[in-house]
Image (tube, grey):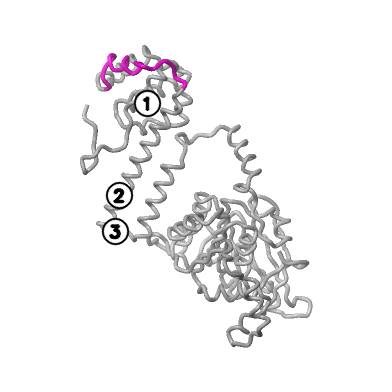
């Protein structure tokens, strides 16, 4: 039986001995099959005959029949595969030198690792082929390759999880930073919704110039100040624009004073105090991504710097779809669901800023509603948390509403909704909780 080889005539990674050890262990003790199944599946075997035998073992088990030598031989004969796998003599040889099945997990691990290496080679070959064909962008080709490699390396052999295991895993995650809620730093919001969670898609929506960017940047800064990595992807504002806001927040000095060269020596001293030499922090800014694929690549890069908790996208309607759709609504829907998928796959909270349509301007009460989300009803449908920002002082300024913003929790998949109030300092473009900042 001739085995396949690479294009350079070098054998691809495999271990025939480990494959035979797994099958032999099951033939000696059928009770070890469930343990093997948690590690590998038939496609992980290099030799096709071994994949056929293992698959037949699983079929027998599914029918509540013991996959011992006799049952296995008869079943392979029934489906016309006995001679193909080497006949009874080859099945008998699988138990040679196998005193017991106690090491089946280790042997299955070797089989799985060799399969992963073969998958990595296949992904690399597809990447090379796509590069030659030039039918996709470099970013899209690399992102697909990274995704395929991640699935090959991280995904469990079986996709089914029992109710007990799901509950225990959930409780375990709650006790670790990995699954802990991510506090936004806005006290009333955190008290109402309990923070945001990895895998959540959070929409922050408002009419232009109300403060979407400042609100989301404030969340990212708070998360980073707590030691977890926060990524802010800006499709609208330059890195310089983001930096000017952060500078004002850190120093309490309007950035215009630095831009007009009016800052005093004491104010420049605040910069040195806020950003001491060698201090890097955990906030990452990016202003080149234009697709969800590219944002996913930046998420993976940011994760190299630590525990990535939040990815902010400013803003949703500026993202380009991976392929052209029939309408703007369809394109926005595709982008929205891609962001939700990104949040789940990356185990990160994605905060996507969104424009509202002009409907609030035509109403007497100009407070936004979820139906005002611009472009597609899929935004409201796909998100876990919808936050609508409103400042009455922009329409009817009074002494009472000066510097006051409303944060409308219009949708909360995990809890209550409501309306909160924030303080807005226009000179610094900064939102605060009314009683204290962060």
Element class at badge 3: loop
The residue that disc 2 covers is: 126
| Residue 89 in magenta stretch | yes
The residue that disc 3 covers is: 135
* Residue ranking furthest to the front: 277
- x 40%, y 34%: residue: 112
- Left or right: 221 in relation to 284: right
**Closer to the camera in the image, 362 or 315:** 315
- CB under 8 Å between callouts 1 and 2? no
Disc marking residue 330: none
Q: Main secondary structure of the magenta part?
A: loop
First of labels 2, 3 by sequence position: 2
**Closer to the camera in the image, 300 or 55:** 300
Q: Position of residue 147 (x, y in %)?
A: 42, 49
Marks 1/2: CA distance? 27 Å
Magenta region, residue range? 85-102
The residue that disc 1 covers is: 55
**Rendered view: 241 above or below 197:** below
**Closer to the camera in the image, 370 or 70:** 70
- Left or right: 240 in relation to 139: right
- x 21%, y 30%: residue: 2
Element class at badge 1: helix
- Within-10-Å neighbours for mark 2: few <14, some 14–19, many 20+: some
């Amino acid at each position: 039986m001739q085995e396949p080889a690479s294009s350079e005539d070098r054998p691809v990674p495999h271990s025939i001995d480990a494959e035979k050890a797994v099958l032999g262990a099951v033939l000696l003790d059928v009770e070890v099959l469930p343990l093997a199944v948690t590690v590998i599946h038939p496609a992980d075997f290099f030799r096709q005959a071994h994949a056929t035998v293992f698959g037949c073992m699983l079929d027998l088990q599914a029918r509540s029949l013991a996959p011992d030598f006799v049952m296995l031989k008869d079943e392979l004969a029934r489906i016309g595969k006995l001679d193909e796998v080497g006949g009874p003599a080859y099945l008998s040889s699988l138990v040679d030198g196998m005193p017991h099945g106690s090491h089946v997990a280790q042997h299955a691990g070797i089989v799985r690792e060799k399969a992963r290496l073969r998958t990595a080679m296949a992904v690399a070959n597809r990447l090379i082929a796509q590069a030659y064909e030039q039918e996709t962008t470099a970013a899209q080709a690399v992102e697909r390759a990274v995704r395929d490699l991640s699935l090959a390396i991280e995904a469990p052999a079986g996709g089914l999880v029992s109710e007990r295991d799901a509950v225990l895993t959930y409780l375990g995650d709650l006790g670790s930073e990995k699954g802990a809620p991510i506090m936004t730093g806005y006290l009333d919001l955190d008290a109402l919704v309990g923070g945001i969670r990895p895998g959540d898609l959070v929409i922050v929506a408002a009419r232009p110039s109300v403060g979407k960017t400042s609100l989301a940047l404030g969340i990212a800064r708070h998360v980073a100040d707590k030691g977890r990595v926060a990524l802010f992807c800006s499709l609208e504002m330059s890195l310089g624009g983001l930096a000017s806001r952060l500078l004002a927040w850190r120093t309490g000095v309007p950035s215009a004073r630095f831009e007009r060269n009016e800052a005093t020596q004491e104010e420049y001293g605040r910069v040195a105090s806020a950003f001491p030499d060698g201090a890097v922090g955990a906030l990452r800014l990016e202003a080149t991504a234009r697709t969800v694929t590219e944002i996913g690549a930046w998420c993976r890069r940011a994760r190299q710097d630590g525990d990535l908790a939040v990815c902010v996208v400013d803003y949703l309607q500026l993202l380009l779809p991976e392929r052209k759709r029939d309408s703007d609504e369809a394109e926005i829907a595709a982008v929205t669901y891609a962001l939700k998928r990104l949040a789940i796959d990356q185990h990160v909270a994605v905060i996507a800023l969104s424009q509202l349509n002009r409907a609030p301007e035509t109403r007497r009460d100009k407070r936004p509603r979820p139906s005002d989300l611009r472009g597609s009803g899929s935004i409201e449908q796909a998100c876990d948390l919808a936050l609508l920002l409103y400042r009455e002082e922009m329409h009817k300024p009074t002494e009472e509403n000066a510097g006051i913003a409303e944060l409308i929790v219009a949708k909360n998949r995990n809890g209550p909704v409501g309306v909160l109030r924030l303080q807005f300092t226009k000179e610094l473009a900064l939102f605060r909780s009314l009683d204290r900042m962060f």
